[in-house]
Image (cartoon, grey):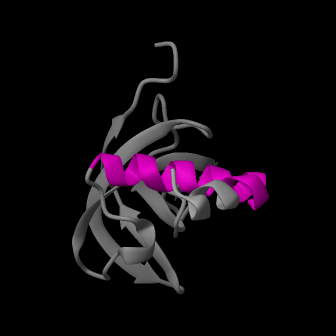
Amino acid sequence: MSLRTALHHVFASQAELEADDERLESMKDGCTCVDQLDNRKRATVNGVLRSVTLRPRQGVAALEAELYDGTGTVDLVWLGRREISGIEPGRRGAFEGLVCATDGRAKIYNPRYELLPRPGE
């Protein structure tokens, strides 16, 4: 470990250390970092779901989740779904689909996903 890395670990906040861990996990799996997503390009992102909410969109049910990977967040939106087993806050996973920038935020609609096992599973 370099001196710079050691000093970073000593003086970094808990949030910065968690972001570093998330970023390393995402890169380890060969996924695209959220801060490097390109609009209208397919991508696979990996991270932890921070929140999951049901938001109807124009009369259609839509399950939305916010994924965090240490570099930023992307919204995952499943249209026509009220719930999906395993899609819950704190769950890790890899999500793949077409990135769309709407309202200044990156979104992936109806992503394919693979939920990763929880520690101890």
Q: How many marks overall?
A: 0
The one of 111 and 19 positioned closer to us in this rendering: 19
**Residue at image point 46% right, 35% down:** 84
Residue with the most extreme top position = 121
The one of 2 and 101 positioned closer to us in this rendering: 2
Q: Residue 50 in the image: x percent, y percent?
A: 62, 49
**Residue at image point 67% right, 61% down:** 8
Q: Which region is colored magenta?
A: 9-29
**Residue at image point 32% right, 82% down:** 39
- Can the viewer see residue 77? yes
Q: Is residue 24 left or right of residue 100?
A: right
Q: Residue 119 in the image: x percent, y percent?
A: 52, 21
Vertical placement of 3 versus 98: above or below? above
Vertical placement of 11 versus 39: above or below? above
Q: Is residue 12 magenta?
A: yes
Vertical placement of 58 versus 45: above or below? below
**Residue at image point 41% right, 41% down:** 93
